[in-house]
Every structure is written in C-alpha cells, then in structure tokens.
Image: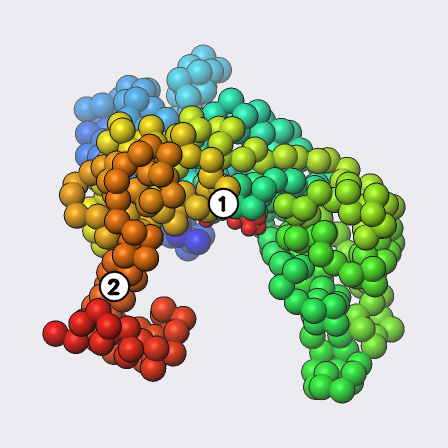
C-alpha cells in the first residue's frame, strides 16, 4: 500500500526536523513547511493525507490555515499543536474540522500516537471510497427496479445469511454477487467463483472440497478445494441447479456442520464461508420435480434476490451503453461513440433475450465495425432493426463483415503474428490462414 503523507507546518525549525525524522522512521512520507503560505503551496501540488500544524505561526496563522485546508480538501486530516492550548482554542480547532489537538510541550510518542490514530481513519476512508466507487462506477442501476435491488443488496451484504440470486441469463447475477461481497465485512478475504455446470461431478467434487495426496489415482499432491480457499470470504456457486445429488448432499452437510474434510483426508477443517448461489433455472420447479433437495434449497435460499431482465429496466440502457463504450474504447484504443436518439429508441424496443451481456457484445461490435462518430440506426444488428423496418444487409454478410474486422484488428494488435492472433481469437492457425485468404487480409 502507498505510504501516507504527512505535512508538518512548524516555524521552530529544530522541532520540525525532529518530527520529520521520527515520522519518516515510522513509515510516512514527509513534507515540511515553516509557515502557512508554504503549507498551502505544498498542499496545492501534492497529495497530503495528514497535516500536523502549529497554531501560532507567522504569515498565515494556524486556525486560518486549518480553515483553508478544509476548504481545499475536506479529506485532509489536521492535527493542531499548540503551546497556548486553552480549552477554547482546542474546541474551536475541533469545531473547524481538526481531527485532534496536542498541547506543547509534548512527548514525541504522543505525536506519533496521534498520527497513527489519524492514519487509520485515512486508510479506512480511502478503502471505503475506493470500494464504493468500484461498486457504483461499474454497476449501472438507475432504473426503479435496479435501485430497489441495490437497496436490498446493501441491506443484506452486512448479514452472514446465504443468498440465492435468480435471474435470466446475462442479467448481472455475478456482478451482484460480487457487489454483495465487496460491501460486506468479508471484502478483504477471497471471493471465489465456481461455475457448477462447467464440470462433471467428480471434477466438481474435488474442485469444491479438495483432496489429499493419494486420495485417488492421479492425486499426486494435496489440492485445496474452493471452499477452503474462500474461507473467511464468499463462495459464489453459479448454475447451482446443475449439481448432482451427491454434491447436493455434501453441500448440505457443509452448511449444517460448517466444516469439511478433503477427499481421502481425516483432518476436519472449520469453515466460515458465505455462500451465494445463482441460477437462471427455476430452482423451485427443480425441487418439485425431485431434481433438487428441498432441505438444501431452503438452506441456500435464506435471502432470495431477483435481478430483473433488461427489458424491464430500459431506463438503464443509455448508461450501460456509455459504460460498455468506455470499456471497449479503452480496450481497442478507439474513440467512444455517442448513440443517436433513433438508435437508442430501437434498442429500448428490443426484447433482449441475452440481457445485459447481449447489449455489451453489441456495443463492442459496433465500436469495432461502424465508421462514424456516433451510433446510427443502421449500425445496429439486423435482429434489432427487424422490428424497426429498416432495410439492411443479409445476416451472413453482416456476420462476415464483423468477422473480417475482428480478424484485421487482432492481427494488427498482434503485429501480424499468426500464432498469437490465432490464440487470442481462440481458433487454430490453419483456420486463421483460411480466413485471412477469404477476406484478403494478407495485403
Ligand atoms: N448493471 C450492470 N451494470 C454494468 N454492467 C453489467 C450490469 N449487469 C451486467 N453487466 C455486465 O454484463 C455481463 C453479464 O453479467 P453477469 O456475468 O454478471 O451475468 P449473469 O447473470 O451472472 O450471467 P449468467 O446467467 O450467464 O451466469 C458482464 O460483463 C457484466 O459486467
């Protein structure tokens, strides 16, 4: 973590240098000013976290300095030092926003303690605002339905209860699960995601619960399971509706006993993991059909959350476009485009079966292939234009134009290196060669 910076404002040079030496040793980055003017100049051009200032000083007096610092940046914490400490000056300083005051003469330890205490506050504030902005910058939630959901997310993030997130494919279930973790007091521990539908039963079992060396043929070394890795934090089990009866039973045991044993192991490991599950299937129906254990369903579904489909929150579309435009344009190093009203209206009318992920993909493609500075109706894919009666090229021609453009950009990005480009595109070198010939990209 970056060192916190402390500015000492003190006209007694010997004292200023003594404080500088001691606080540097304590791990702070130090700045020195011998009067208030100098202090303000330093604050203007440097990122200062804590100011330690004398009250009686030439030029700008300590109280006036405190006022100006707070006007410049409320987040800077100020500790005042004074030889004339009456209760009144102390109270005034605190009223004006000082964090602490210290009476002169003081022990050096007193100053170090006060700076340490204040630095904890600074670190917490920085951390919280970083989390907060990470949360709000990436997660668009302006529609009434999303605002309601976010309200719930904030409410439940503080509890330890298991959460079950429902919602169609691509609505943002994982993003919400992550937000819950980031807003909880588990944020400093891991957030571990497992896609339960991606692995066959035995692999999923060892992935989740881990195994000891020799537990089965091929278990050459101990492997820690995802539950163990998530200890203290959150595990996000995506596509939970797809887990087999055996895994359902093991999961139920873990939730009940709050401990696990690795496969082939005898040691019991205590677990403190919050479980967030998600699925775009209807888990209740699976329970009714006997495919999912009812007792497990109730354990997982302590707090149910539903992420609404995009068609029910079209108010978010404009901001989502802006978010994806800015992500993609920095990825492809191109200028972001603005959306024209007609095009926005067409997007609002579309049904969005693939939800936010589908919008994300469309914006990425438009940024790559469309030429103008803005997104026009004609730039939208045929499936969206169909409803708007806009004549357009055939689907095949459209697909090919996208493919050619993606290949061209990737090749450029990889400096013409076929192996790298093929790897990036997830296709074989042979197939890339064929496409290069097809689209005449050699020249
Ligand atoms: N509200 C939102 N604001 C910004 N981006 C979003 C929002 N919702 C979803 N996204 C983005 O859309 C994409 C799909 O979201 P995510 O993977 O969270 O959906 P999901 O519901 O978990 O999907 P699946 O059903 O396939 O598991 C991600 O890239 C995510 O960052």
- Residue 261 at x, y = what percent? 83, 67
Classify residue 341 by image quadrant: top left
Quarter occupied by the C terminus = bottom left
- Outermost residue toward the left in this view: 443
Q: Provide the secondary structure element on which disc 2 rests.
A: helix
| Count of residue discs | 2
- Residue 181 at x, y = what percent? 60, 44
Q: Which residue is identified by label 2?
A: 404
77 vs 395, nearest the viewer = 395
Q: Provide the secondary structure element on which disc 1 rests.
A: loop
Left or right? Give the position of 154 relative to 274: left
- Residue 367 at x, y = what percent? 26, 48
Q: Residue 34, relative to residue 58: is it above or below? A: below
328 vs 114, nearest the viewer = 328
CA gap, disc 2 and disc 1: 24 Å
Q: Residue at x 54, y 25 (%)?
A: 145
Q: Residue 178, relative to residue 190: is it above or below? A: above
Q: Label for residue 354? A: 1
- The answer to the question of whether label 2 and label 1 lie on touching residues, with beta carbons closer than 8 A, is no
Categorize mark 2 by other alpha carbons within 10 Å: few (<14), some (14-19), many (20+): some
401 vs 294, nearest the viewer = 401
Ranked by sequence position, the earlier of labels 2 and 1 is 1
Q: Residue at x 50, y 42 (%)?
A: 353
Q: Residue at x 61, y 40 (%)?
A: 167
Classify residue 210 by image quadrant: bottom right
- Residue 208 at x, y = what percent? 71, 64
Categorize mark 1 by other alpha carbons within 10 Å: few (<14), some (14-19), many (20+): some
Quarter occupied by the N terminus = bottom left
Left or right? Give the position of 61 relative to 275: left
Residue 182, visible in the rendered structure: no
């Amino acid at each position: 973590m970056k060192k916190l910076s402390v500015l000492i404002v003190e006209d007694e040079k010997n004292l200023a240098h003594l404080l500088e030496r001691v606080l540097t040793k304590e791990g702070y980055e130090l700045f020195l000013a011998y009067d208030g003017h100098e202090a303000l100049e330093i604050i203007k051009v440097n990122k200062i976290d804590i100011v330690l200032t004398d009250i009686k000083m030439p030029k700008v007096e300590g109280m006036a300095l405190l006022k100006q610092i707070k006007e410049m940046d409320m987040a800077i914490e100020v500790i005042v030092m004074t030889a004339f400490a009456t209760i009144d000056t102390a109270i005034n300083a605190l009223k004006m926003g000082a964090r602490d005051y210290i009476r002169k003469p003081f022990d050096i330890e007193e100053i170090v303690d006060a700076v340490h205490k204040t630095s904890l506050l600074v670190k917490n504030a920085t951390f919280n605002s970083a989390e907060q902005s990470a949360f709000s910058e990436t997660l668009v939630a302006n529609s009434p339905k999303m605002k309601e959901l976010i309200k719930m997310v904030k409410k439940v993030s503080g509890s330890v209860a298991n959460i079950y997130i429902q919602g169609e494919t691509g609505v943002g279930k994982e993003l919400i699960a992550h937000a819950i973790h980031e807003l909880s007091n588990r944020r400093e521990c891991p957030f571990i995601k497992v896609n339960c539908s991606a692995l066959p039963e035995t692999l999923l079992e060892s992935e989740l619960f881990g195994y000891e060396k020799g537990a089965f043929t091929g278990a050459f070394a101990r492997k820690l399971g995802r539950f163990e890795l998530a200890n203290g934090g959150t595990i996000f089990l995506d596509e939970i509706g797809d887990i087999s009866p055996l895994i359902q039973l093991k999961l139920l045991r873990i939730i009940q006993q709050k401990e696990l044993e690795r496969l082939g192991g005898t040691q019991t490991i205590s677990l403190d993991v919050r479980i967030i599950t998600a699925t775009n299937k209807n888990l209740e129906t699976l329970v009714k059909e006997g495919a999912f254990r009812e007792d497990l369903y109730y354990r997982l579904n302590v707090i149910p959350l539903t992420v609404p489909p995009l068609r029910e929150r079209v108010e978010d579309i404009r901001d989502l476009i802006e978010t994806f435009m800015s992500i993609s344009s920095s990825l492809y190093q191109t200028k972001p485009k603005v959306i024209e009203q007609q095009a926005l209206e067409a997007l609002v009318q579309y049904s969005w079966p693939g939800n936010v992920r589908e919008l994300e993909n469309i914006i990425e493609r438009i940024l790559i292939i469309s030429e103008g500075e803005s997104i026009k109706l004609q730039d939208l894919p045929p499936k969206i234009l169909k409803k708007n009666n806009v004549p357009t090229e055939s689907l095949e021609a459209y697909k090919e134009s996208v493919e050619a453009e993606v290949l061209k950009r990737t090749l450029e990005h990889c400096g013409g290196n076929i192996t790298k480009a093929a790897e990036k595109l997830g296709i074989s070198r042979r197939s890339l060669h064929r496409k290069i010939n097809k689209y005449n990209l050699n020249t």
